[in-house]
Amino acid sequence: MGQHFLDNPAWQRRILDSLPRGVGGVWLEIGAGHGEMTRLLADSGRRVVAIEGDARLAEGLRESARAHPAEWPGVEVVAGDALHLDWEKLAGAKFCVYGNLPYYITSPILHRMFAYAKQIESAHIVIQLEVAARIVARPGRREYGYLSAACQFYARPEILLRIPPGAFRPPPRVESALVGLSPPGERTSLKIPDEKRFLEFVQTCFGQKRKTLANNLRAMAPKERIRDALAACGLRPDARAEQLSLAEFAALYARLA
């Protein structure tokens, strides 16, 4: 299933030390694997809801929890797909997220996470370093794209650790990173009435990165209206999406939506 298990105890401890340590509350763990981090999360004094998509691994986690209840206090194992489960129903009104994500579903998991933006107190995910660089990239950087804008709309992202391939079994062919996502992001200051439509608009702006905004938005409005909207927002006629801040996207959206 594309999983690389974090089986190095030193890196497990470094990651744990980077997480919120307050007693009480709930951890929602995505991709619990063999429980590499589950037991450590449980030791923090919080309830842990451990989601694992592989049924055999999930049953192994349950057996460990039954056999060693003192080491796995408050752990609930859920076998299922995190993309389709109801996180709020599992974890409650407020929870923190930790996940060692299979690289191929990083973006879908992040978008699923955004659906619970009001419930999530913090999120910490282990992902491919290249994707982490895109998440934290600011306007004007080559890595800045729709994923950057969406993540920064909902949270303040930060690369906390760079993790070498040797920390995992089997080792991936790329470096990884622990990314912290601290809500709220810029959504609170922008106050967009329809956030779903706004992000669809931003995604359209990034439709083809080599094209200008005027070209990417041509299906939304006549070129004269797009030209006037760009001018009213103080943007050049040949502006590209990777140059715009979220505030500038919001201003342009208000004139074109």
Image: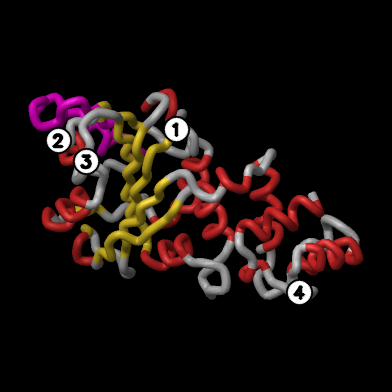
For label 4, the residue is 236
In the rendered image, residue 54, in percent from the top left (x then y), is placed at: 33, 39
Give, as a single range, the part of the protein colored magenta. 48-75
Residue 67 visible in image: no
From the viewer's side, name the closer residue of 61 and 50. Answer: 50
Q: CA distance from mark 4 to mark 2?
A: 54 Å
Q: Which mark is residue 41?
A: none
Left-right relation of 224 to 230:
right
Query: How far apart are labels 2 and 1 at the CA level?
Result: 23 Å
- In the picture of the structure, the residue carrying the numbered disc 3 is 21
Q: Which residue is mark 2?
A: 43
Amino acid at the residue labelled 3:
Arg
User: Closer to the observer: label 4 or label 2?
Assistant: 4
Q: Tag 4's secondary structure?
A: loop
**Quarter of the view holding residue 92:** top left
Q: What is the spatial separation of the Cα atoms under label 2 and label 3, in whole angstroms?
A: 10 Å
Residue designated by label 1: 119
Q: Distance from label 4 to label 1 (Cα)? A: 39 Å
Give x and y (percent) for residue 132.
Answer: 41, 62
